[in-house]
Image (spheres, grey):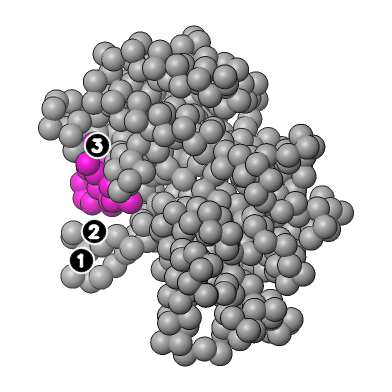
Amino acid sequence: MRALMSRSRWTARRSALLLMLVLPPAFGLTACGGADSSNSITVLGTWTGEEEKGFLAMIDGFEETTGLSVTYIGTRDADAVLASGLKNGNPPELAVLASPGELREQAAAGTLVSLDRALDRKQLVSDYKPTWLDLMQAKGPSGQPHFYAVIVKAALKSAIWYSPRNFPPPARRVLTSPKLTWDRLNTLIEQLTATGRSPWCMGMEDTSNSGWPATDWVEDIVLHHAGRDTYDGWVAGTVPWTSPPIRRAWETFGRVIRSRPTGRGALRSLLLTNFGSAGQPMFERPPGCFLEHQGSFITGFYARHEPRLAAAAKTHPQPGKDFDFVRFPPLSPGSERADQVAGDLLAMFRDTPEARRLIAYLATPKAQAAWIRRPGSTAISASHRVPSRLYPVAVSRRVATALTEANEVRFDASDSMPPVMAAAFSRAVLEYVSDPSRLNHLLRQLDTVRTAGAG
């Protein structure tokens, strides 16, 4: 069992299995540990570091209960490893998919195994709201919808973060008011801008995936200003990028950018700042910025930051005291409420009884509680059957409440679009940040990609 392995044995086994997945069968290697493969399940994912420890905490209970062995392969190149395994006819039993767009493509192509036999539908209906159940389904080769994934953990993306310790008290009362609207937020932004400092913390860099923090901005504006129907049509490719509501969302984001210090150097800094460090100036005194639009996973980055003035004492920002959030405001009072979310989708690529048992277990509140209750964990369960008291801090409990009690959520739009469309979106938004005057050209280009995909 994995839990009993020494660290050196575990590292060696994981490295060997990684080779088994990327090398063709002709090399004579078998997946899942060779002769003992009938009792072993391989899971491929992008979780490393603390996230990997969280997932291993989930599967500890499964191994102890069943006597089966789970081998987890965590790598940031999981997409490439999975593609190689599929090409060689040697995929892992279970793998985390990068996006719902990829889930739909793989399901339609017949690459995925339907989870209808593995999952207890009545139990799922009891544990998850319909809006989350919809995100776990896709249409198979026959065109009929089936369960093809389990959302192992989720994140709230419609969130605006601030530092209660550093945020001006009068402005904080406006920000945290239940009556906060987009117009009231903009008035607050103007007041903060008058202090001579940037109201918004922003960073667009993320190695090979730069630009997604900006796409998140556009997506939230579309969802909260144009509404769910427009958002859904835009994701599905039936609402053009050049249509008025989508254009307005880009222009609104452009005004957010212009609320920051301008100039060539400032734009370059925005494009080169890593998303994980963009919010650090919130915690300095005086703060270098006041607000950040970011997913709930950002709290892991906040908690590791060492403010300059406190570095000697090795203190880190504390949830509730140094960082907290409000939900992205609607365009006007009484507007329909829907939040943008993200999640890690675990799907089955090889159908075995052991794999079915594992994925059914990972969908349960018991399994997901093992990850979210770890000290310092940023993981959130989409299941409303996971007790909120298990979350280690109040901020996480509030995020969980927002996710599990929401009647309507929408998955991150770019993640839900076909991969080619999503990549074009990320490139375009970086170009827009560099030169907002090119908006018309960029939107026409995106429509060209959209129509080509539809054809």
Q: Which quarter of the figure is the N terminus placed in?
A: bottom right
Total numbered labels = 3
Q: CA distance from mark 2 to mark 3?
A: 23 Å
Specify the amino acid type for callout 1: Ala
Q: Residues within 10 Å of mark 1 (few under 14, many from 20)?
A: few
Q: Secondary structure at mark 3?
A: helix
Which amino acid type corresponds to the residue marked 2 in the rendered image?
Pro
User: Mark 3 Cα within 10 Å, few/some/many (few <14, many 20+)?
Assistant: many
- Which element type, helix, strand or loop, lies under badge 1? helix
Q: What mark, if any, has residue 151 been given in the picture?
A: none
Q: Which mark lies nearer to you, 1 or 3?
A: 3
What are the residue bounds of the magenta stretch? 270-289
C-alpha span from label 1 to label 2: 6 Å
Q: Please tell me the numbered disc located at residue 307.
A: 2
Q: Residue 109 location, x and y as percent?
A: 65, 41
Q: Which residue is mark 3?
A: 271
Which quarter of the rendering shows the C terminus?
A: top right
- Crowd class of label 2 (few under 14; some 14 to 19; many from 20; radius 10 Å): some
Q: Amino acid at mark 3?
A: Leu
Residue, disc 1: 311
What percent of the width, then of the height, locates residue 39? 69, 80
Q: CA distance from mark 1 to mark 3?
A: 27 Å
Q: Position of residue 30 (x, y in %)?
A: 57, 74
Q: Is residue 383 magenta?
A: no
